[in-house]
Image (cartoon, rainbow, N blue to C red):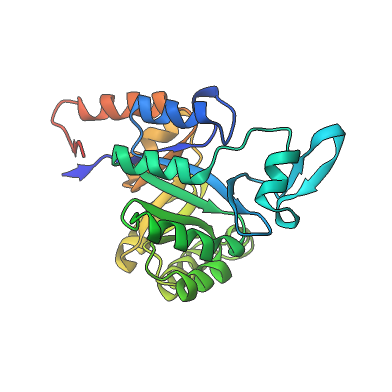
Amino acid sequence: MKQFPLVTAHTGCMGHPDHSLASFRAALAIGADVYEDDIRVTRDGGLVLAHDDEVALAEGRTGRLSDMTLAELDEQSVEDRLPLASVLRWIKETGKTMNLDIKSAACLEPLAEMLTRMEMADQAFFSGCEYPVALEADRRARQFRKLLNVNIDSFLTSPYAEAVDRACDEGRAARCFGLNVPYQLIRPEFMDAAKRAGLAVFVWTVSDPSEMRRMAGMGVDSITTRDVAALLAVKAETLNKEGRSYVDE
C-alpha cells in the first residue's frame, strides 16, 4: 500500500506572514511533517529567513542582505528576523524536518557548518537548487540531502518527455535524492521516469484540495502548501476511504 505524501508547510502557512514565528508555530501545532522556509545569508555569513536579497530598512531606505552584516541587519531592519538557529533547534526537539530553500549558493557553507554543529543531517535538506547550485552543493555540502529544482524553462521549450529526461539526468548527476517540481508539471510519465531514476518527487505549492487529491493519487512523495489544514483534511479523507489504498506514515 502507498503512503500518503509528506505534508510540507510553506512559510506563511495558515494566513500568517512569511518567515514568521506565527507561521512556524502554526505548522507545528497543526501537524505538518516538514516546514519550508527561504534562506539567505548576510555578508558575514549570518543565516536569515528571507526570500529576497533586498530588505526594508529604517527611514524608508532599502538594503541588500548580501551587503550587510548580521549586526547591521538587526540594527537597521524594520522587520523582526526569526533566527534560523532557533527554528532548527525547535525542529530538532519536535522530530520534524526542515526544508531549507536556499536562495543563493553562498548559503551552502554556513548552512553545512550550522547543521553539522547541531547534528541535524537527518532532519534537514536543501531545496531551491537549480542544476548549477545542486552541483555546487554536491561539492561543498555532499553530506546533506538536496532536491533538484527542475528547469521549468525546459518544459516550456522542449517536448515534455525530453524535459522529464533532462530533470532526471540532472538530478542523478548532482546526486539529489529527489526533484522539486511545480505541481502543474506532473503527469504519470513524469512519475514513472522519476521512479525509474530512483528520485523522489516533491511538488509545490498546492492550494486547491482537488489538486491535493490528484497529486496524492499520482504518488508524489511530498505536497507543499500554505493551507496545511486543507491538506490534512484531504489526508484524513483519503485514509478513511473504504478499502484503504493508503497507509498513514
Compare residues 22 and 245 and report the one nearer the observer: 22
Q: Position of residue 50 (x, y in %)?
A: 62, 44
Compare residues 87 and 144 and report the one nearer the observer: 87
Compare residues 19 and 92 and report the one nearer the observer: 92
Q: Position of residue 84 (x, y in %)?
A: 51, 45
Q: Residue at x 47, y 27 (%)?
A: 227
Side (left or right) of 42 relative to 115:
right
Figure check: 206 above or below 201? above
Residue 1 falls in image quadrant? top left
Side (left or right) of 142 relative to 77:
left
Side (left or right) of 132 relative to 247:
right
Residue 31 falls in image quadrant? top left
Q: Position of residue 48 (x, y in %)?
A: 59, 47
Q: Position of residue 221 (x, y in %)?
A: 33, 48
Q: Residue at x 41, y 50 (%)?
A: 202
Side (left or right) of 40 relative to 171:
right
Q: Quadrant of the C terminus?
A: top left
Q: Residue at x 71, y 56 (%)?
A: 66
Q: Residue at x 51, y 26 (%)?
A: 22
